[in-house]
Image (spheres, rainbow, N blue to C red):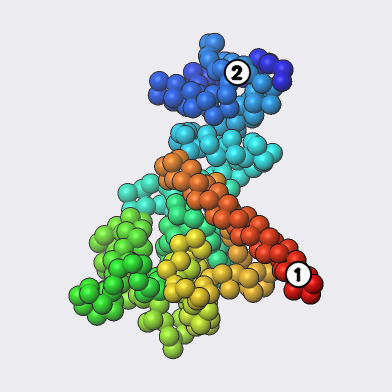
């Protein structure tokens, strides 16, 4: 493969410093990921290496330069841009410009960090029922809570209802003190934390006391009609088909539902089909319903989380291939055995 040398003119010392990162850690990370030699001449970044990798590097640097000044450039952002560049989708990075999803109690702006997150948020704005399915760290629950708080502040919803199925994940709920609400409170902690960050503890407590915010186990939804509310069902992979149907049919006039879950982390008894998997199969394409599938590329936690998820996906793919191979071998053996018996 031919070796080439290309440069990109950053044109600004401030922009250059932002791209390079502390002690050039961003540039060093980019060059290591793409097997390039990278260095700086004035306000220009020079890339040397195989033509394909240099072109990818230039695409990534160009995309990073177009990001708004308040967007943090780090390993996870660079990794994400490399993924998009390899897929020929680097131009989509422009979709992340602007668009504040919510503002925390301390004034921090919450924005989408990936294309998948952006599409997920747009679906919530547009459709009445949205399924957000994806691995841990993709922000599916947090963004849903952000959208709920934004809708409540804009008076588009009179109430926020957050719920989870009370499924034991290795721990025994019976040994925890209190009633069902108190037993599942530890499992609802991520929802409490998100609400407190967005609203502030004082406002959050007042709204809870007034009943404007309700955080409850899924069992408490049965028999109710939930009108003029923004309703979030979290950890939906742990619902049965019957529970999911019960939940979806609670929706009343003026309500919006967001259902989130990770189908790789199910705690249902063996043999029980997940209500989330079933619902996304039969409802995908139904008017007013969106199914948004987030992937490892949408992970916004530590970059290592993305690599861990990919390792598990690769392991699962390997198991599936092995099962298929064993199944094919068995089907080939059966006719031979039959012929031997006939002889």
* Residue 225 % position (x, y): 47, 85
Per the rendering, the mark at residue 260 is: none
Query: Relative to the observer, which residue lies in front, 288 or 337?
Result: 337
Residue that carries the numbered disc 2 in the rendered image: 47
Tell me if residue 81 comes above or below residue 179 in the rendering: above
Residue found at the very far left of the displayed protein: 177
Left or right: where does residue 238 sit relative to residue 286?
A: left
Which residue: 44% across, 72% down? Answer: 268
Tell me if residue 314 comes above or below residue 61 in the rendering: below
The image quarter containing residue 122 is: bottom right
Left or right: where does residue 282 sit relative to residue 175?
A: right
**Of labels 1 and 2, the one closer to you:** 1
Check disc 2 and report its element: helix, strand or loop: strand
Q: Are marks 1 and 2 in contact (CB under 8 Å)?
A: no
For residue 42, say whether it is visible.
yes
For label 2, count other residues whose C-alpha is less than 10 Å away and answer few (under 14), some (14-19) or many (20+).
many
For residue 62, say whether it is visible.
no
Q: CA distance from mark 1 to mark 2?
A: 66 Å
Left or right: where does residue 200 sit relative to residue 136?
A: left
Query: Relative to the observer, which residue lies in front, 70 or 153?
Result: 70
* Residue 237 % position (x, y): 48, 68
Check disc 1 and report its element: helix, strand or loop: helix
Tell me if residue 109 comes above or below residue 179 in the rendering: above
Which residue: 75% across, 66% down? Answer: 336
Quarter of the image with the N terminus is: top right
Quarter of the image with the C terminus is: bottom right
Residue found at the very far bottom of the displayed protein: 223
Per the rendering, the mark at residue 340 is: 1
* Residue 278 % position (x, y): 58, 73
Query: Relative to the observer, which residue lies in front, 199 or 143?
Result: 143
């Amino acid at each position: 493969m031919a070796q080439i040398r290309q440069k990109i003119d950053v044109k600004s010392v401030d922009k250059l410093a932002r791209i390079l990162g502390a002690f050039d850690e961003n540039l060093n990370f980019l060059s290591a990921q793409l097997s390039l030699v990278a260095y700086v001449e004035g306000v220009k970044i020079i890339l040397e290496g195989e033509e394909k990798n240099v072109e990818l590097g230039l695409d990534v640097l160009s995309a990073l330069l177009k990001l708004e000044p308040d967007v943090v450039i780090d390993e996870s952002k660079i990794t994400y841009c490399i993924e998009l560049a390899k897929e020929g989708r680097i131009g989509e990075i422009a979709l992340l410009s602007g668009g504040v999803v919510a503002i925390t109690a301390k004034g921090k702006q919450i924005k989408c960090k990936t294309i998948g997150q952006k599409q997920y948020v747009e679906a919530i704005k547009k459709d009445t029922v949205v399924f957000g399915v994806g691995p841990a760290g993709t922000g599916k629950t947090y963004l849903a809570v952000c959208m709920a708080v934004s809708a409540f502040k804009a008076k588009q919803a009179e109430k926020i209802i957050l719920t989870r199925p009370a499924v034991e994940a290795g721990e025994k709920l019976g040994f925890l003190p209190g009633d069902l609400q108190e037993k599942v409170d530890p499992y609802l902690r991520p929802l409490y934390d998100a609400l407190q960050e967005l609203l502030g503890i004082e406002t959050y407590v007042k709204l809870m006391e007034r009943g404007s915010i309700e955080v409850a186990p899924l069992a408490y939804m049965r028999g109710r009609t939930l009108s003029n509310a923004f309703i979030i069902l979290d950890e939906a992979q742990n619902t049965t088909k019957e529970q999911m149907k019960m939940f979806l049919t609670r929706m009343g006039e003026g309500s919006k539902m967001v259902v989130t879950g990770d189908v790789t982390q199910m705690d249902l008894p063996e043999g029980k089909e997940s209500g989330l998997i079933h619902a996304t199969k039969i409802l995908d394409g139904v008017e007013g319903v969106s199914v948004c599938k987030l992937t490892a590329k949408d992970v916004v936690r530590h970059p290592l989380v993305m690599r861990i998820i990919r390792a598990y996906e690769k392991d699962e793919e390997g198991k599936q291939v092995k099962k298929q191979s064993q199944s094919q071998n068995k089907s080939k053996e059966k006719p031979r055995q039959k012929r031997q018996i006939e002889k």
